Image (cartoon, rainbow, N blue to C red):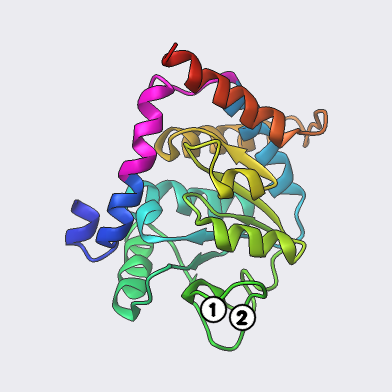
Amino acid sequence: MAGVKRGVTSEHGLIAHGRGEAYDYLLGEKTHDFALAAIDAAAQLLTSASHPVISVNGNVAALVAADLVRLSEALGAPLEVNIFHASKQREQAIRSCLQKHGAGEVLMPSTDAELDFIDSNRKYVHPEGIYKADAIFVPLEDGDRCQALRQMGKAVVTVDLNPMSRTSRAASITIVDNVVRALPLLLESLRGLAADNGRHSAEFDNLAHLAAAEREIRSQGS
């Protein structure tokens, strides 16, 4: 609710996040091995990208703004505001929230660049940000835009507590975990990569990861 009061998060976003939180209870409110594997794979993908970008909506800004700024600094990747429900006022509030936590320049949506394969407000992006990116970190994403980004040939890393969502299944790498736990662990993994001169692991199988997460969720109800 604090994010809504600050004008950062929409009421629709608050409801959507509540649905996601239900899956966290089924996951035991902890980070599982399959999520740790996805986090390590995400760190490798993002560090190997030529132009990574971090996409920020209201929910993620309200929850982990400081970690997003740290991630931006660690990757040398710009932060870009992108929201589903059009609101210049809320876009500015999100940018102010990020800058309050130490962000420098924050890219904003522009009608100068549009994503293909999508009709919602989220098609408007910055020409030097998401439009140009080869890899995008988009925690708490909506399925339509995730699918559009993939159709455009972009790698997508997301954080989603529901392994059965369209976003989870469309993304290149899905971290099935709560974003408040996942972001510090992603930063830790990036530091480990830097210390180990960019170690490489086996190719990541996102569908197998999602299947493991779904089995864990189903086991809680059996």
- Mark 1 residue type: Tyr
- Tag count: 2
Figure check: 35 above or below 218: below
Name, please, the residue furthest toward the bottom.
Answer: 112
Question: Is 192 contained in the magenta span?
Answer: no
Instruction: Depth check: give the residue in front, 32 or 15.
Output: 15
Residue 116 at least partly seen = yes
Give the magenta part as a residue range.
18-33
Task: Please state the horizontal and vertical placement of residue 204, each as a whole percent of the image.
Answer: 76, 33
Residue in the image at 70% along x and 72% along y: 132
Whether residue 98 sits left or right of residue 218 in the image: it is: left
Residue in the image at 66% along x and 42% along y: 173
Q: Can you identify the residue that label 2 sits on?
A: 114
Task: Please state the horizontal and vertical placement of residue 59, each as a whole percent of the image.
Answer: 36, 54
- Mark 2 residue type: Glu
Whether residue 204 sits left or right of residue 130 in the image: it is: right
What secondary structure prevails in the magenta region?
A: helix
Residue in the image at 70% along x and 46% along y: 172
Q: Which mark is residue 89?
A: none
Report if the CB atoms under discs 1 and 2 are less than 8 Å apart. Answer: yes
Rendered-image quadrant of the C terminus:
top left
Secondary structure category for the residue under label 1: loop
Figure check: 3 above or below 89: above
Of pointers 1 and 2, the one earlier in the residue sequence: 2
The image quadrant of residue 51 is bottom right
Q: Can you identify the residue that label 1 sits on?
A: 124
Label 1: few (<14), some (14–19) or many (≥20) C-alpha neighbours in 10 Å: many
Task: Please state the horizontal and vertical placement of residue 68, each as a whole percent of the image.
Answer: 47, 51
Q: Give the alpha-carbon distance from disc 1 to disc 2, as whole Å.
A: 5 Å
Residue 52 at least partly seen = no
Label 2: few (<14), some (14–19) or many (≥20) C-alpha neighbours in 10 Å: some
Name, please, the residue furthest toward the front.
Answer: 222
